[in-house]
Image (tube, rainbow, N blue to C red):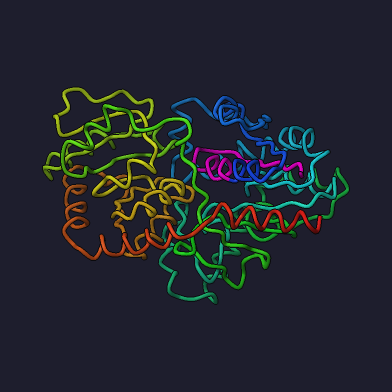
């Protein structure tokens, strides 16, 4: 039995894939500790997993959430002002449990993980949850900060290497806390802890997403294993309520509208416009609203609730409207139904562009999310059979993948040589 630390931070889309790995590694007999933000303690411990808190704490201010989801300033606020500014705290918290560990698995934004691993001479694995993490010149990303650069997608790696280098130059100063700590710890300098291969483990990089979204490119780290998605969405904690189940069984498959677990804290008019779009289409609908106030005077054809496991409700939908976070995107792809994606920021615009290229989805800009346009685009998704065919085809591929076991096998292979 090996002692394995798994560290992550962020939304449920960042936590659930690591929960999936943690549960599987426990089932294989390993001593597992899941290190993440304090706010997830009860969720993790309810699953029988060992929990350890790492800073920073999760933000709770609704106004801050709106800024964190902003397409221009959101990435800087999360990475520079929240995560990187706390790298010393994260390092201390992680070091406290890693000192007697046999292996460390860390989400790519746990910037303290390489420091801990190098100081302890500990074998470890990096995790990337979405293709956007690799900033490839061969498969250029779509960025909310510089959306115009997406137009260079078809110009090939020669031009797009310039885009990657430009991104690195803009983001590199954010890494100052890491550069300072590396110097203090006597570790060699690196070029960039945020963008590029410097941030990844020399032992193993786990790309915890499906090959239908992204495949290894020549400028990816050479030790990447693309595993497939590692699914967990609370199905051990909460199931569809009797009320929701009765609604789902009482008529045609509904539209499902959701904003994941982070963007839902900054919904704007999403739910109000979604209600009107469903009415225009004369379609049944389910609104997954988190902690937002439920709309009043909904027609009997629309049901609003706080949460339902995506693995249970998405397969029962006719189409899904969502924000494009990687966790929601993965579940929607696995369900095999067309999607309309309204991206905010971070990885969401890139995920949206990828599923559009797959032929399963359309994109609607957040500023243009109005009932009339939503109804028109959903009508196209539902009436054009090519979307349903492509969605079903990709759903079959993803359901056939075994991301959790592929990832755990790769981790155990590293333990054999550690």
Residue at x 16%, y 23% (from the top left corner): 297
Q: Nearer the viewer, residue 25 or 59?
A: 25
Horizontal side of residue 28 vs 43, given as left or right:
right
Total numbered labels placed on residues in the image: 0
Q: Percent from the top left, x then y, of residue 148?
A: 41, 61
Height in image: 317 above or below 33?
below
| Residue 290 sits in quarter | top left
State the extent of the magenta-drawn residues as a range.
1-20
Horizontal side of residue 255 vs 22, given as left or right:
left
Q: Is residue 4 magenta?
A: yes
Placement of the C terminus among the 4 image quadrants: bottom right
Horizontal side of residue 87 vs 69, given as left or right:
right
Q: Nearer the viewer, residue 371 or 39?
A: 39
Residue at x 44%, y 28% (from the top left corner): 63
Q: Percent from the top left, x then y, of residue 76?
A: 56, 44
Horizontal side of residue 275 vs 170, given as left or right:
left
Placement of the N terminus among the 4 image quadrants: top right
Q: Nearer the viewer, residue 374 or 107?
A: 107
Q: Percent from the top left, x then y, of residue 370?
A: 22, 43
Q: Percent from the top left, x then y, of residue 162?
A: 56, 69
């Amino acid at each position: 039995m090996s002692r394995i630390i798994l560290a992550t931070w962020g939304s449920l889309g960042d936590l659930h894939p690591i929960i999936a790995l943690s549960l599987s590694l426990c089932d294989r007999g390993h001593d597992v500790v899941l290190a993440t933000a304090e706010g997830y303690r009860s969720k993790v411990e309810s699953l029988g997993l060992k929990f350890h808190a790492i800073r920073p704490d999760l933000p709770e201010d609704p106004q801050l959430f709106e800024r964190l989801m902003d397409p221009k300033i959101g990435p800087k606020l999360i990475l520079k002002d929240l995560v990187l500014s706390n790298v010393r705290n994260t390092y201390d918290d992680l070091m406290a449990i890693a000192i007697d560990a046999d292996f460390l698995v860390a989400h790519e934004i746990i910037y303290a993980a390489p420091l801990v691993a190098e100081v302890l001479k500990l074998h470890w694995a990096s995790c990337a949850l979405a293709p956007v993490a690799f900033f490839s010149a061969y498969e250029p990303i779509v960025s909310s900060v510089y959306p115009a650069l997406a137009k260079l997608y078809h110009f090939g790696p020669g031009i797009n290497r310039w885009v990657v280098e430009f991104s690195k130059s803009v983001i590199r100063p954010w890494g100052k806390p890491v550069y300072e700590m590396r110097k203090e710890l006597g570790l060699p300098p690196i070029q960039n802890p945020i963008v590029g291969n410097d941030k990844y483990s020399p032992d193993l990089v786990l790309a915890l997403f499906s090959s239908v979204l992204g495949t290894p490119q020549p400028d990816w780290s050479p030790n990447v294993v693309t595993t497939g998605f590692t699914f967990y969405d609370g199905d051990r904690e909460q199931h569809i309520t009797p009320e929701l189940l009765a609604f789902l069984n009482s008529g045609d498959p509904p539209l499902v509208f959701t904003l994941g677990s982070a963007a839902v804290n900054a919904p704007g008019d999403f739910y109000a416009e979604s209600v009107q779009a469903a009415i225009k289409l004369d379609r049944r609908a389910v609104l997954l609203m988190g902690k937002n106030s439920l709309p009043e005077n909904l027609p009997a054809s629309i049901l609003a609730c706080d949460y339902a496991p995506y693995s249970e409700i998405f397969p029962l939908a006719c189409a899904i409207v969502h924000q494009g976070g990687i966790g929601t995107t993965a579940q929607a792809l696995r369900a095999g139904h067309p999607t309309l994606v309204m991206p905010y920021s971070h990885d969401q615009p890139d995920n949206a562009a990828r599923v559009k290229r797959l032929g399963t989805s359309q994109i609607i800009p957040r500023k243009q999310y109005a009932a009339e346009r939503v109804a028109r685009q959903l009508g196209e998704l539902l009436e054009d059979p090519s979307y349903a065919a492509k969605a079903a085809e990709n759903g079959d591929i993803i359901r056939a993948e075994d991301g959790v076991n592929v990832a755990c096998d790769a981790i155990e292979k590293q333990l054999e040589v550690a």
